[in-house]
Amino acid sequence: MTELDHRVRGVDHVAFPTFDPAATVRFYRDVLGFPVVHSICAAGWGPEDHPDFIHFFFDIGNDDRIAFFYYFGTGTEIGGAEGAKGDVYARFGAEVPEFFVRSRHLAIHVDNEEDLLEYRRRLDASDWPVEMQIQHETIESIYTHDPNGYMFEITRAMRPVTPQEDLDANLTIDALLDVVAEPEPTFGKLLARKAELIVERAADWELARSEQEAGR
């Protein structure tokens, strides 16, 4: 596959609907300290049955933003059945496992443990205390749900990701695509295919390493 040039420069914004704009502002602006940086008031927008709305944005650093739509005249019933899991935008039935529900989330990066713990302090003193604090392979994260039911994560790196891990990630994805293209994909089949790809590509990696060393 031809490698495409990489031209994007991060997230401009992610956007979600909200049914409680007051609590949303309290959570993001008043608890976390994310400034309101932009808003759009739209009346008569789109088709005749489209409600008037306000679209408002919070600064989450690096010129990135999180945004919300509040549609006037819509109630919480639009989010789905009472008691259904998930956020108001995409409800899941009670039979859906919790791990699947929580896979939809927004993660915001901070530079160090001190900053992570400061946001934990702010959340724990609010109506939305931290629900989990977990160390993953390379990151440590705190989690809660915002007023709209969205899983919200703040994370910090515990160490840099190495080039070898980037290579491993691409191997894993290539193996995954091969496995899910066949009937009954399993984790075991993924690992087996990944091992096959390592064997297939080892000679090319060794040649590239030798050429790099010769060019020094």
Image (cartoon, helix red, strand yellow):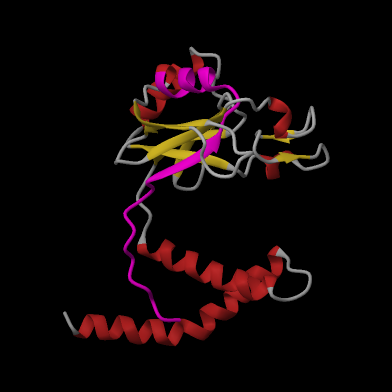
**x and y percentages locating residue 89 in the rendered image:** 64, 38
Q: Residue at x 54, y 31 (%)?
A: 52
Q: Residue at x 41, y 24 (%)?
A: 119
* Left or right of 165, for residue 114: left
**x and y percentages locating residue 69 in the rendered image:** 52, 33
**x and y percentages locating residue 23 in the rendered image:** 53, 18
**Viewer-closest of 204 and 88:** 88
Q: Is residue 198 magenta?
A: no
* Left or right of 53, for residue 82: right
**Viewer-closest of 67 and 152:** 67
- 194 is higher (above) or lower (below) than 43: below
**Viewer-closest of 55 and 73:** 73
Hey, which quadrant is residue 111 in on the image? top left
- Magenta range: 1-29
Q: Is residue 18 magenta?
A: yes
**x and y percentages locating residue 210 in the rendered image:** 29, 85
- 21 is higher (above) or lower (below) than 90: above
Direction right: furthest residue: 95
Residue 204 visible here = yes
Q: Residue at x 31, y 63 (%)?
A: 7
Hey, which quadrant is residue 194 in on the image? bottom right
Direction left: furthest residue: 216
Q: Residue at x 51, y 23 (%)?
A: 24
**Viewer-closest of 28 and 202:** 28
Quarter of the image with the N terminus is bottom left
Quarter of the image with the C terminus is bottom left
